[in-house]
Amino acid sequence: MPQKRSIRIDGELVQVARGETILDAARAAGRTIPTLCHFDGLRNSGACRLCIVEVSGSNRLLPACTTPAEDGMAVTTSSPKLTAYRRMTIELLLAERNHLCSVCVSNGHCELQALATSIGVTSVRFRYRYPALPVDQSHERYVLDHNRCVLCSRCVRVCAELEGAHVWDFMSRGIQLRVVSDLDQPWAEALACTNCGKCVQACPTGALVEKGRAVEEMAKRCSQVAQVAMKRGAPR
Amino acid sequence: MSRMEDISTFNAVREAGLAKLLPDVPRVTVGMGTCGRGNGAEGVYHALAEANDRAGGLLASVGCFGPCSEEPLVGVWIPGSPLVILRRVQQGDAERILADALDGRIPPDLAWCKVEEWDHLTAQIKYGHGYPELPSWHEVPFFAGQKKIVLRNCGFIDPEDIEEYVAVGGYQALYKVLIDNQPACVIEQIKAARLRGRGGAGFSTGIKWDYLAKATADAKYIICNADEGDPGAYMNRNEIESDPHSLLEGMIIGGFVMGASLGIIYVRAEYPVAVHRLTHAIEQAREYGLLGDNVLGRGFHFDIEMVEGAGAFVCGEETALIASLEGLAGRPRPRPPFPAQRGLWGRPTNINNVETWCNIAPIVVKGAGWFTQTGSAKSAGTKVFSLVGKVQNTGLVEMPLGTPIKTFVYDIGGGGAGGKSIKSVQTGGPSGGCIPQEMFDTPVDYETLAQLGSIMGSGGMVVMDEDNCMVDVARYFVEFTHSESCGKCVPCRVGLDQALDILNSFTEGTGSLAQLELLGELGRMVRDTSLCGLGQTAPNPVLTTMRHFRHEFEDHILGRRCNAGVCTQLALSPCENSCPLHMNVPRYLQLLKEGRMEDAFISVLLDNPLPASTGRVCQHPCEDRCRRQTVDEAVNMREVHRFIADSVLGSEQWGPVMDRIQARKLASTGQRIAITGAGPAGLTAAFYLALLGHDVTVFESRQEPGGMLRYALPEYRLPKAVLAREIEGIRCVGMRFECGKKVGADLGLDEIEGQFDAVFLSIGTWQEAAAPVAGAELKGVRAAVPFLETIARGEPVALGRRVAVIGGGNAAIDSARTAVRLGAETTVVYRRERKDMPAIAEETAEAEREGVRFLFLAAPHRIVGDPRGNVKGLEIMKTRLGEFDKSGRQKPVATGEITRFDCDSVILAVGESVDLEFGRLSGLGLSPSGTIVADRFTLETSRSNVFAGGDVVSGASNVTKAMAYGKRAARSMDRRLTGSDRFPALLEAFEYDQTPPPPAAGGPRRRGHERPVSVRVRGSEEVVEGLTTADAIEEAARCLRCDVRA
């Protein structure tokens, strides 16, 4: 098997190494595929479905983050259908919980907000659910606001894979799915937590934030966490 | 017990098993699957065991033979005779079954069918011959066409006895594979057999096996997926319960050829019997040297473990199943890597469904060529389906792939339960789709079902009839997948929640067409972007129902109606929902019960402007769904509103009551409306439009208003005086009648349109449909409606002594009973059976009492004339019932047998059609059958401000349906002319008691008194006299008040 694979991203020929994904290839080609649950250096979960692309010869849409780049693949990263689906995904996320940007500490620094803007979501056709979820303020330095959570699992993975603490995981299923610390204790009582704050920095929205931030003040240091993760050698 | 280590020990076990299967004494078996136990098989077994202690026969518990609706099943075998299957056996039957068996007899009342020999594929068992009076098993419709490969042993052997399995050729395939020691050849054989995954996805089993066989790793695993979770599907449960060793054998063979050392069976914990039998089977297999070290003495090491799943539906998805086995939450992960690359504990893994494993041993023994003889080109073999829902025979059926759906529904299932018409079949459970009746020719295989937007799935087949609401079906399945979604990916987690929300809005009557479009878009998005199979297939029930049953969605959204009566929030009560006029039945019954006759009359009249007429002639669909039927008989709602109408019309109360109605009339709008045709549709529209304040003119081609009510319904059913009084009541609301003016001939449509702001066309169907019978031109052949009209005008008709009436609708019965009153000997000739007649059943019964003869299953072949051109006789073709048509009735098929009888005239009552001439002249959009095309909800035609309704739109129908058109047209026309929905303002609010009565209140159903036959056939007096006051009030008290909600 050749070490290098060549694949076409929107017509452009790109060389990628064995084991790299379509997302890696697209980035090498300078293409932007929208992502939310992907986090550099962490295992991909394929949960948000924003990075779906069309691959010629396949009758289904494939997630760029988990699909290995195969020799000879021809990938389309943008089409009316993909845009419509991505738009709807964002709409569904906005409708799922409470994403009132104007009163959010992450306003202006939020990946969900940025995605909505770049994909052109100007209205939501679905009913807003507003489920009134609890806010865990028990931790000394951080807050977990479930109402802003998009369930991307970046906190879960960064804690388990990078910090090695595995404080976070999910409970329940379906629309009831919720992030929990340890066995659904208040965060402050989660014995495994090292207070490292990586989860907060990895969180794409205002769900995990530092205490004491006012509206628009919560800029995350995603890239720093990602750099640490990449240095340690990314798992697949 | 003996370990099987070589051919002699193997044979010894087989002999031991055969001795149990075919002992020297009678063997009695009880089907003890979960389904059998649910129907009382345990009680039967214990009773038989007790009796057997004294009798000394051999009693065994076996698996299930398939037909759930006939459980509990008992098999009786007397040495030398066929095995006889007894059905619906009760505990009390035990003694005599055994006593009879020991005497060499079979209880005839319980005997269902016999099995003379059985092909277990891996062996044949010859039971014996005899009992010529009993049908063989494959002659029973439920089994006809079934081919038992997977279920080859089910219901014959004791699933808890490995020796019986070996006796019918079990583990022979394994032995052969181990001795041949050619794993690659076995895989090639599976490939050549074109066996495909029976879990639903249909991936080639051979190719999948090849992947694992070629994978290199320190350990490899094989898994059996027995996490069956579809509502209404229980194939795998039965396969394990009835024949667990067949599964084990398949897995041991798989383990050997793929090089795996451990097999794991992931079975639902909710299947306790299956879990128990499987545990027992695995223990036995270890004991007999089929698992563990040195399998069958051939040096192969393999073991099987069983893991109980906690019941999450998503764990049927292979990656979620693996996560669950690893002790993680059952959430899927993206593929690739596929399990064959990285599966359980990161090792290469193969996962197959129970049924796939059960197919292995027969393929190994009989060969790929034999296997591919069954099934379709791309899908070889059989598939087990659980046929459930609204069919007469339910159960597990194993059919060759590619069998058309209609075979399942009509041949095996026996058609709709209770004679209802079947609407759809749902395949594949919550991941599948609904296939409409029009497509029942569709062969059931992987590709064809996928083309229709459904899937084969694990084999659930749920039949639905007219009482199922397809919107509710879609909602139900989405509710299921919504609650079973793991929540990992966005489309499935949030998309299904939003889809459920939209579907709920439809069933609650708050949805919009925009939401329907959004639902379609959302469904496609969830299908195309979800992470695993659950999300990818969850929209199928929605997308297929939207594709094939869009009209039902529109009914819910635009009409705010659920015709099946399932969505309770869209209906007041079952009677109100099934009434074409949506009369508030519980209200008038209660008002009458409270003694408020005037209020009751106003309640009735505002819902139905012709209550005395419909009270006599309505088809009363309200009774079909009346819940009182669950206590005794339906409430006689029709007779009660007839009583209310008869009591007020013409009495001194009438004047004041009509004043109250008049007082409800809205202020004049100054809009002029023309109604053409003063039949039930036109009169109804006129009544409401006049009340709404419009200036209404009714044009009628005949001399008097009333349409079919006046000119086609015989006096003995609806006296002209009653009708005249009712029309008088309508007229006094304020409208003009112009009789003797025919639209088209006397008055052009353009002309009317010029003079009026809106037009309602309700000209009915007066043209007799062309009769497809030779000799229709002879003198003495008449069409029913013109015949009835002549009588209604009081003109004489010479029928002769003997009359034949052809047809089975109300017109046929009316003609026949009229002919009897003219002194003729009358025979009705109908091509189907009595139960298929569209005529009101009571009318048919009364006709028979009056001396009308009926010839069923007889179609007119030729009308015979004499040389002068007069009718002399009728030749009829005997018919038999063939395939089912869309109405859920079987089509009559000519047998070729012709008989002849003499008659002097023939009345053709084979249906009426629209006056095509008018349709052409009007320039309106017409359907192929000549009816005017009008919007289903607004009744607007292709010309703006021209509306149409009644028979001219629907084709010949009935009075109440025509009136419903008139009512809808009035509301729609008013909305068009005024821009607002003012109709509800007409209706009056009543205060009345809202406490439901005790369930059995009111005693038995009251009927109107009928005049004796001898009196009625001599004149045209009304046959049924109305209810007496006391009876009417007591009948009203029988209502269970379904309209009262907690």
Image (cartoon, coloured by chain):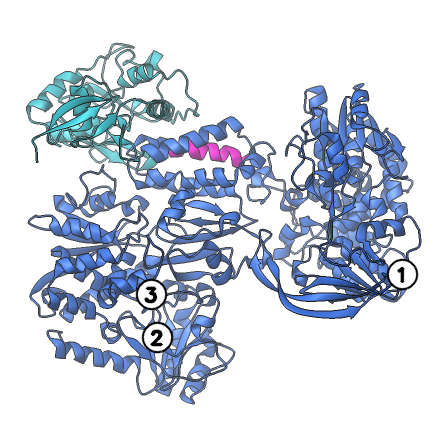
Quarter assignment of residue B890: bottom right
The residue wearing badge 3 is B151
Label 3 crowd bin: few (<14), some (14–19), many (20+), radius 10 Å: many
Q: Which chain is cyan?
A: A
Rendered image: mark on residue B118: 2
The residue wearing badge 1 is B822
B143 left or right, relative to B878: left
Q: Position of residue B489 (x, y in %)?
A: 29, 32
Label 1 crowd bin: few (<14), some (14–19), many (20+), radius 10 Å: many
Amino acid type of the residue tagged 2 in the rendering: Trp
Q: Examine the residues drawn in magenta and state their main secondary structure.
A: helix
Mark 3 or 2, which is nearer the eye? Answer: 2
Is mark 3 in CB contact (under 8 Å) with mark 2? Answer: no
Residue that sits furthest to the bottom in the current view: B103
Amino acid type of the residue tagged 3 in the rendering: Leu
Above or below residue B402? Residue B545 is: above
Picture quarter with the N terminus of chain B: bottom left
